[in-house]
Amino acid sequence: MTKPQPISGARNPLLADWTAAYGLPPFAAVGAEHFRPAFEAALAEHRAEIDGIAAEIAAPSFANTIEALERGGRSLERISNLFFVLGGADTNDALEAVEREISPLLARHNNAIYLNRALFARVDALYRRRDTLGLSAEQARVLDRYQTRFVRAGAALPKSAQDRLAAINERLASLGTQFGQNVLADEKAYALVLEDADLAGLPEFARANARAAATERGHKGKHVITLGRSSAESFLQFSSRRDLREKLFQAWISRGESGGATDNRAVVAEMVALRAERAKLLGFASFADYRLDDQMAKTPANARHLLEDVWSRARAKAAAEREALQAMIAEEGGNFDLAPWDWRYYAEKLRKAHYDLDEAAIKPYFQLDRLIEAAFETARRLFGLRFTPVSVPLYHPDARAWEVRDTSGRHVGLFIGDYFARASKHSGAWMTSLRDQEKLLDDIRPVIVNVCNFAKPAAGEPALLSFDDARTLFHEFGHALHGLLSNVTYPLLAGTAVASDFVELPSQLYEHWLEVPEILQTYARHAQTGEPMPKALLERLLATRTFNQGFATVEYTACALLDLDVHSTPETAALDVTEFERRDLERIHMPAEIMMRHRLPHFQHLFSGGGYAAAYYSYLWSEVLDADAFEAFKETGNVFDPATAKRLRDCIYSAGNLRDPAEAYKAFRGRLPTADALLKKRGLDNFAVEPAAP
Ligand SMILES: [Zn+2]
């Protein structure tokens, strides 16, 4: 007789051994119904491991406490990784239901670890004698990070405060899931269906994309514009139908603010209040103070200082840009003031007129497959990596995989690219992983995923990107390299597990190589003729680098300031989200013709989970670093300089969280960065700083 087995590994593929190549999950065998029981089994397994560590009789040692923590939770990790890859890139109603059930359970599980007094007593005892333990530099860093995590979670607080924190964390997890699902629901529900007369101004590639979207949305034979960024932005850029631009724009900026079941305003208000309460319990004045305490910026004041410097210059540049666009409207005999739904359209026209540059003429040169090759070639020249396509079963037919090897032929990892938009995918672009690098259990190589939302072409047509899309591809690939090149022992420190105002350095820095002539001349080839982009066109394209940067900087920086403000405000009881946003924009003198890149009701960086809550400034903070870091290559006269590339790899791309971010940067550059290169890159260096807004 054997004991009854409530959950059999044989019946649940998630709990069986994963025997596919590269440790990939058995995608084809996995259904939504497998996740709940698998999560329950994995949570129970990890709980038993944690209880064992906390109840250990032997005195705490690095091995029986910290290393034991690092060895635990492996089933939970692989199941979570798979679940969140699918939940982001290929979800459905059944998976969404599991996500709503499971997110508070995961929060409760985290609470049970980080609010466990017996466990924290062991970590704390080790931390207090850290100098006597004979630890390696990496081990000391791991111990330091655990101590910080426990303290920041509230492990040292009295029981009553801990109980409240636990309740807050669970509620925040549920709200974050709901927020993301609401935005996706609003995006799925909307389609701007175009009749032939509505296509005015749209170039062929935009029409082709709209036909493909129509087929996917069940309007075969028509043209459909969706609220996905590529689709919506290219319509706003090209459609000469001002009425339709306004209609689409209003729908786009109203995501999460429908007034119906998917309205996110109450969700935002509750999340802001709960985050503020949590920060107070932990001894901080606001959530922003709490969040930034463990970032490179350290304080909201430091982040704000950078944002406000850039903000006043950006507004001045945007004002000059607005004048030029308004003049163009007047020249055409238009009798109206430039509105937010006009900006992209007239900016595109002005770009065409001034630089003889036309997005529709550039686009055939940016083929997705050639740009993937360009990203690989850059990684070969900088880091000696080689990418070979492999045929392995994945979760969706549009996802592709490449095996990554170094110059000696050693296996580095697996890279998965999932590039096309679809209704089952959340909007945006991101990097994630199915498996992270480590050397603790074994020499484990990473499996890294890039997800994008490029418009999918009709069958048989090449996928064409905008220059912005190409930049996104390089950006996410930079994150992917941060995961692939990771070279640490302990999983806690692997790859992108760094401060959020440092994590955009590897991604944003990589964007610089897209623009170097060696790469563009080779890989920007016309989809029909195969000809490289003519040199004159290439030069004109690169000359427009700072064109419209006032607009781009304003739409981003307003969001970053609003994020700090909403996460610093003491008025969190019954927060009126629309009113707060309106007053905040008034305070910073937001130009009326520019809309924030993300409004609060659909600001997924802040509220779909909390990855960038009070940390949206990170992109600009990291841009100071990346602009300065690329100068290090330029100063050598060779943008692929081997010695600089080696330092970059050793100190940044392969170093995970081995060091404090400022120290890591100094090790690479020999000094801390200055903002000069950033201001020059955005064309803001010639715009004077006005006194900061009150
Ligand atoms: Zn990024």
Image: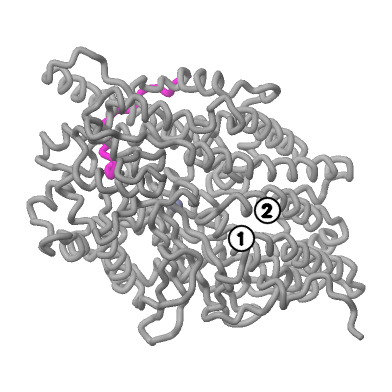
- Per the rendered image, the range of residues in magenta is 680-694
Within the magenta stretch, is there residue 636?
no
Q: Is residue 670 visible?
A: no
Which label's residue is closer to the chain start, 1 or 2? Answer: 1
Q: Is residue 524 visible?
A: yes
Majority secondary structure in the magenta region: loop
Which is in the foreground here, disc 1 or disc 2? 2
Residue type, numbered disc 1 = Phe
Q: Where's residue 114, x and y in %? A: 77, 55
Name the residue nearer the viewer: 275 or 394.
394
Q: Residue at x 19, y 45 (%)?
A: 204
Name the residue nearer the viewer: 460 or 111.
460
Q: Circle 1 sits on which residue?
A: 83
Q: Secondary structure at mark 1?
A: helix
Alpha-carbon neighbours of circle 1 within 10 Å: few (<14), some, or many (≥20)?
some
Q: What quarter of the picture does the N terminus occupy?
A: bottom right
Q: Residue at x 22, y 47 (%)?
A: 205
Q: Are marks 1 and 2 in contact (CB under 8 Å)?
A: yes
User: How much space separates mark 1 and mark 2, taking CA atoms?
Assistant: 9 Å
Position of residue 410 relative to residue 645, above or below, is: below
Q: Which mark is residue 98?
A: 2
667 left or right of 80? left
Alpha-carbon neighbours of circle 2 within 10 Å: few (<14), some, or many (≥20)?
some
